Image (cartoon, rainbow, N blue to C red):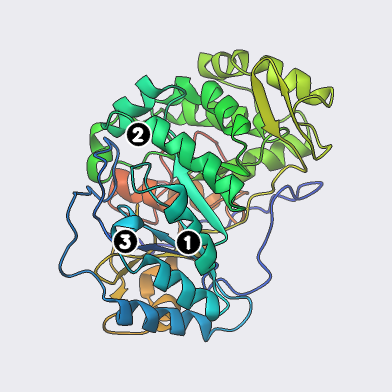
Amino acid sequence: MVSTDLPVAAPSAVPNSAPYRQLHFDRGARPFLVLWELTRACDLACIHCRAESRSWRDPDELSTPEITNVLNDLAALGAPRPIVVLTGGDPFKRPDLSDIISYGTKLSLRMAVSPSGTPLATRKNLAELRLAGATAVSFSIDGASAESHDSFRRVPGSFDLTVNACREAVDLGFHLQVNTTVTSETVDQLPGILRLVGSIPAGLWSLFFIVPTGRGRLLTPLSAEQVEDVLLFLAEVSDVMPVKSTEAPQFRRILVQREAGPGVAPTTSLYSRLMEGIGDVLLAGNHGNVGGRNSTTSRSSGASVRSGPARRPLVVGDGYGVVFISHTGEVLPSGFLPMVVGNVRDSSIVNIYRESELLNMLRSPYLYGGRCGVCEYRDICGGSRAQAFAAYGDPLAEDPNCSFQPVTDPPAIAS
């Protein structure tokens, strides 16, 4: 049930500076990021898979002409055109992948790919994507060792294939993003994964905070206090490694608090545990040997961190600058928020994005319920709409994974 009761207006949080980026166009008129599940076919069997992938392709997948028609619609928006991320399943399972990338590139769309770490992720196949015009790729690493990663992905050898594909991608000139799923089962791996990501070296480490959808319903999410401590850890890591969070937008609030003063105090032992695992990396970074802001890549104690200015996260979210297209053309706010708002087989992706009642509500933080609706940081955070829906069946409810208490109390719920 979607609540449309208007909560008390939130006070404005005015930081001394803005450690985040705002888009310079109307997020209600055009998406910044289009995540496109080309197929659900994949040769992995990951225990967290949102798509509950399988090894075969769905005969109802969008055809190549249907895909190019949608790319035409996106390109017609003009500059700045959206970034299109081709994902899955495993997009390498589609034989027309390079043709799709080439077509989008010719339309001046920025094309990125998110393949799986399988035997298909070869240098030859990656080189074909680069030649077709793809500029960025992302791979997932969910463990610091073959044992931990392969256990999560449920295919022996996936770790070695993934790390090798990451190194090949960097060598081919791709911008590389490494994705890591954060659950109770993987969280203690984060310090080791950071070292691995730095040694590749990746340009961005993106942490996905598990939403209980698909196979992810079987995993154990962190408590709200533990999520806060992981984000505090990431704030420290951001000084030596570009990082971003997915389905945990309160990271932007934490960065603002950190910029404005002493920041937020950790509340569980998890923060200390994670920090102990990277103490030497941060120390070396502070001395300019590892990380820091001197735009070098260096090594210390087995760690290598690609440095440069800290990456400021964008203020975007599910349906709010971000939109998802499924393999059968369904349009959703994100792959983690399973509420269909249209289908590209029936209507233009641009019209769906602009006119959907749900998407317009998601772009209106004053409609949010609970703590999110009255939070002084709602305009730069807003909470995860996917987490809210997974917990309460209401995408406008408060984010259960955030422990922050706003200045203004939320209105009492009538009995």
- Tell me where residue 231 sits by quadrant: top right
Q: Amino acid at mark 2?
A: Ser
Which secondary structure lies at badge 1? Answer: helix
- Tell me where residue 78 sits by quadrant: bottom right
Which secondary structure lies at badge 2? Answer: helix
Q: Which mark is residue 158?
A: 2
Residue 213 lies, in percent from the top left, at 27, 45
Give the CA distance from mark 1 to mark 2.
21 Å
Q: Amino acid at mark 1?
A: Leu
Q: On the rendered structure, is 261 left or right of 68?
A: right
Q: How many marks?
A: 3
Residue drawn at 71 percent across, 32 percent down? 240
Residue drawn at 61 percent across, 13 percent down? 276
Question: Which residue matches tag 1?
Answer: 129
Residue 116 lies, in percent from the top left, at 37, 46
Q: On the rendered structure, is 109 left or right of 215?
A: right
